[in-house]
Amino acid sequence: MDRYAVIGNPIAHSKSPLIHRLFAEQTGQALSYEALLAPLDDFAGTLRGFLVAGRGVNVTVPFKEQAWALADAHTAAAERAGAVNTIAVQGDGTLLGDNTDGRGLARDLRFNSGVQLRGSRILLLGAGGASRGVIQPLLAARPDQLCIVNRTVEKAEQLAMMFNDLGPVSAAGLHWVEESVDLIINATSASLGGEVPAISPKLIRRGHTVCYDMMYASEPTPFNRWAAAHGAARCIDGLGMLVEQAAEAFELWRGVRPDTAPVLAALRQS
Ligand code: ATR
């Protein structure tokens, strides 16, 4: 049976083993998928150890940049993202690094949530690794504008410069933008600390603006609570993105595309 795993630290609460088990059942693929805790100072050892027999891994916080460095080759998405969340062992034993986070986000927005990205005005909050991983697929959806807004504006400016050959991307500080947008995506880690980035509520047009937090939790995230209180048309969390990025990884490994809707419904119920 082909073996796969997700490697992270922490990892105990990862939903990836359940998601991939449901994908495997649904598509009739014989595979196993486990969660592996890597020591903070030895991701490489954990990866190598698993890949003696394993066929591929998912990589999560805080190892995605290290995974990028350890991959022998990168997909275009991973190259741009500077981070790898999926590794596939190729026929000759070399490691292909992909980044499926951004495609997962774009698919979740489009297909699960029915959000039109083409021609839209998007504000992307945050300029860390999570943000960098989704810029290319967002620009590929042809928005009217993508503004990266960050507390440390220089980091947003750097990212905008790295991607400005791909579409209309700009940068701003948290307080600089006040005109409403169609979609706000929170890619900061502020929710982890129970905080909301200090942006203007005027960014939300009541009953129109969609707000998306890449984080998810059993309760609405602080950002989504803030967005709802200011009249956002919809507040979406990152559970759909998690399932969609997993489906992209599954397809890379197995050549079969699972149906994500029943898996997302099962996760929401549990
Ligand atoms: P990740 O890989 O999850 O993106 P990161 O690289 O540490 O993590 O980036 C965290 C992002 O969240 C950054 O954009 C950070 O803003 P700064 O660059 O100014 O540090 C943002 N962030 C974290 N806490 C925040 C808060 N309370 N308010 C606003 N932005 C916050």
Image (spheres, helix red, strand yellow):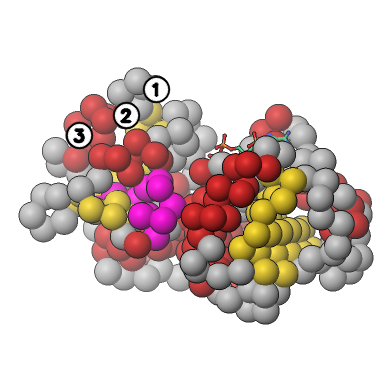
- The image quadrant of residue 228 is bottom right
Looking at the picture, which amino acid does disc 3 mark?
A: Arg
Asked whether 249 or 189 is in front, the reply is 189
Asked whether 170 or 113 is in front, the reply is 170
Asked whether 176 or 234 is in front, the reply is 176
Which residue position is annotated with label 2? 43
172 with respect to 83 (left or right): right
Res 48 label: 3
- The image quadrant of residue 90 is bottom left
- As measured in the structure, the alpha-carbon distance from the residue carrying label 2 to the one carrying label 1 is 7 Å
Q: Is residue 38 magenta?
A: no
Mark 1 sits near ligand 1, with its Cβ under 8 Å away: no
Q: Residues within 10 Å of mark 2 (few under 14, many from 20)?
A: many
Do the residues under discs 2 and 1 have CB atoms within 8 angstroms? Answer: yes
Q: Residue at x 29, y 40 (%)?
A: 69
Looking at the picture, which amino acid does disc 2 mark?
A: Phe
What residue span does the magenta drawing correspond to?
Answer: 77-88
Looking at the picture, which amino acid does disc 1 mark?
A: Leu
Q: Give the secondary structure at mark 3.
A: helix
Q: Residue at x 87, y 50 (%)?
A: 200
Q: Residue at x 81, y 55 (%)?
A: 177
Report the image quarter containing ligand 1: top right
Q: Earlier in the sequence, mark 1 or mark 3?
A: 1
Which residue position is annotated with label 1? 40
Q: Residue at x 71, y 30 (%)?
A: 193
- As measured in the structure, the alpha-carbon distance from the residue carrying label 1 to the one carrying label 3 is 15 Å
Q: Earlier in the sequence, mark 3 or mark 2?
A: 2
Q: Give the secondary structure at mark 2.
A: helix
